[in-house]
Amino acid sequence: MQFSKFGDKFNRYTGITQLMDDLNEGLRTPGAIMLGGGNPAAIPSMLDYFTELSADMLAKGELLAAMTNYDGPQGKDAFLNALAKLLNDTYGWSLTKNNISLTNGSQSSFFALFNLFAGTTAEGQKRKILLPLAPEYIGYSDAGLEDELFRTFKPEITKLDGGLFKYHIDFERLKVDADIGAICVSRPTNPTGNVLTDEEVDKLDKLARAHGIPLILDCAYGSPFPNILFEDVTPFWNDNTVLCMSLSKLGLPGLRCGIVIANEAITQALTNINGIISLAPGSMGPAMATEMIARGDMLRLGNVIRPDSFGHHAKRVKSFNEVNNDIKDQTTNLYI
């Protein structure tokens, strides 16, 4: 049996596949404490909320309606409209439903986005995604239809009191070449928890605009929701920004609902990709999220998702030198 180039590339056993296999193994292991892998651990108060919400929606027939009907390839209209209004009212943005599209989880969002903006163009140019600092999310690394899709730069690291440190984008070294199709960064970063400052995001936005490319912000853990942050940051969006979120980090990873906020051209492209690849995104997550917004709960639920919500678990904090070595290893592997 011979696979195509696509088959050979995506038949590899990658880091993100191994991570998900480990999570599946944990579910089948008696006594395992599931702390989550890209989603919060099971928090009793959140589970109680989801139990009550789903029971109420089931009694009203709303969950059954979601299970027995397709949404459109852009996603559930009621959720798109409700989310646009919520973000406009809260942050003064000017969104319509045409700025929002849904996917079957944020991993699907990034597969589509990376291959929209990077790879070989119709003119034969090879374009890349710029990751302005590493380490970055392991799930990005194998998402390209073509290899060598990324370029990244080592961070600037500031030592703080008490053995702590903060790493920043090294804007002195950061270079946006003509072959860069988009800039992408997570805020906060998985798995380090590093949070870009408002100033860093503003500088990246200016760089992206100056080079005519979009800035992709992966805010799956951050603002506007679930806002699992311990830094005071400002939610950021404009028509050159692609803002990505997920219901997984609210504690609903099984519903596979990614959310992308972008300009109308990008929204239409993602809608068309959805139609071809999956017909439509799943309906259960958007149905539940619409009800959360109606109840005024979507933004406040992030206050529940905190370490003290599910008890304290022993953890070992790496030394500065260990983390610095990890960064060197990752940038060596990623730097092109």
Image (cartoon, rainbow, N blue to C red):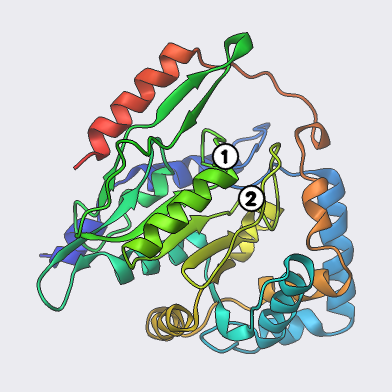
- Please give the residue where the numbered disc 1 appears in the rendered image: 195
Q: Is residue 136 left or right of residue 60?
A: left
Residues under numbered marks 2 and 1 in contact, where contact means CB atoms less than 8 Å apart: yes
Query: Residue 225, relative to residue 194: is it above or below?
Result: below
Counting from the top left corner in percent of width and height, residue 48 is at 87, 54
Counting from the top left corner in percent of width and height, residue 30 is at 65, 34
Judging depth in this view, the residue of 95 and 283 nearest the camera is 95
Query: Residue 197, relative to residue 249: is it above or below?
Result: above
Query: Residue 95, relative to residue 68: is it above or below?
Result: above
Quadrant of the rendered structure where residue 129 is?
bottom left
Judging depth in this view, the residue of 65 and 94 nearest the camera is 94
Callout 2 crowding tier (Cα within 10 Å): few <14, some 14–19, many ≥20: many
Q: Residue at x 73, y 74 (%)?
A: 88
- Disc 2 or 1, which lies upstream in sequence? 1
Q: Residue at x 57, y 43 (%)?
A: 188
Q: Residue at x 58, y 82 (%)?
A: 75
Query: Residue 144, relative to residue 200: is it above or below?
Result: below
- Please give the residue where the numbered disc 2 appears in the rendered image: 222
Q: Is residue 163 left or right of residue 298?
A: left
Query: Hey, what amino acid is under mark 2?
Result: Gly
Query: Hey, what amino acid is under mark 1?
Result: Val
Counting from the top left corner in percent of width and height, residue 217 is at 50, 56
Callout 1 crowding tier (Cα within 10 Å): few <14, some 14–19, many ≥20: many
